[in-house]
Image (spheres, rainbow, N blue to C red):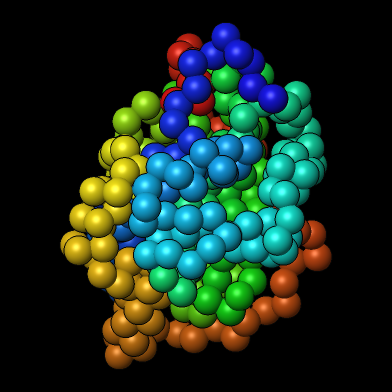
Amino acid sequence: MNNTNIIQPPAMRLYRGHTTHQRSTPFKHRFRYGLSLIDIDIDRLDEAAVQSRLFSIEKPNLFSFRREDHGLRKKAALRPWAERQFADGGITLDGGPIRLVTFPRHIFYKFAPISLWFGHGPDGELRGILYEVNNTFGEHHTYVAATPDTLRHQHAADKVFHVSPFFDLSGRYHFTLRKTEDRLSLIVETRHGEAQTHVATIQAKASPATTPMFARLATLKPLSSLAVTLAIHWQALKLVFKGARYHNRPAKPDQPNTFAKTTGHPRPARETAA
């Protein structure tokens, strides 16, 4: 499926770093915690499964990956779903690789506030991105974005999906994404007009997805993705005590995805399936 002349990266890598959230209105609130992500080629899951004794595909292990955690939430191939999302945004991959950056399942649990799907052409050039967003109510929505020939991608879309009960559906998302061979940077701003009301970031560095690295992750962050959910609820409790207004959960969007427009000023550089 991939061009044989292109040197393929490993079927799976790890990203280790941190996320920061900062609220600006009606009061300031900021928190930061560590995170670990996997970067996996969805067409090479069998290869990823043998990279570490502590990681499995569709089977219990200390860390694992299951297809049902993404896309249609079924035990089905992920490529047809992903290609359909890209196609809805006018993006064709022509069979090129698709890499998914997400939180791994840890023992029995997984929650991924956001997952990033990188769709490439057969030559390895990045053509599009899916921002797959989940909330703690078990709902999900995808923002689809084309990528010009740049290393730093900027997109904007109206906020249509309920994420936090302490924010309503007004405002607009502004995504700034950069993925190089060894680093990942994501900034998601919520703006009302020119005013920034909330910003969430991910800053992470790549490392091999080996057994020693997974063992280190389990030692340093024994709760892993469960800690993400615990942190979300702990910060929500803090917001309640600060007087944040609670917004009831609205109905889900009629459409499963939303197209995000390219913004900013593209740079004359090229990003491949690094």
**Where 176 sits versus 3, above or below?**
below
Choose between 41 and 249: the one closer to the eye.
41
Q: How many marks?
A: 0
Which corner quadrant holds the N terminus? top right
Q: Tell me residue 172's x, y (percent).
A: 56, 54
**Where 139 sits versus 47, above or below?**
below
Q: Quadrant of residue 254?
A: bottom right
Which corner quadrant holds the C terminus? top left
Q: Tell me residue 28's x, y (percent).
A: 28, 69
Does any portion of residue 28 appear in the rendered image? no
Q: Residue furthest top?
A: 5
Q: Is residue 46 left or right of residue 75?
A: left
The residue depicted at 60 percent of the width and 71 percent of the height is 162
Q: Tell me residue 84's x, y (percent).
A: 79, 43
The residue depicted at 77 percent of the width and 44 percent of the height is 80
Q: Is residue 47 left or right of residue 29?
A: right
Does any portion of residue 38 appear in the rendered image? yes
Choose between 258 and 128: the one closer to the eye.
128
The residue depicted at 26 percent of the width and 63 percent of the height is 218
The residue depicted at 38 percent of the width and 28 percent of the height is 180
**Where 110 sits versus 147, above or below?**
below
Q: Tell me residue 82's x, y (percent).
A: 70, 44
Q: Is residue 88 left or right of residue 223?
A: right
Q: Which residue lies furthest to the bottom in this view?
A: 241
Choose between 140 and 80: the one closer to the eye.
80
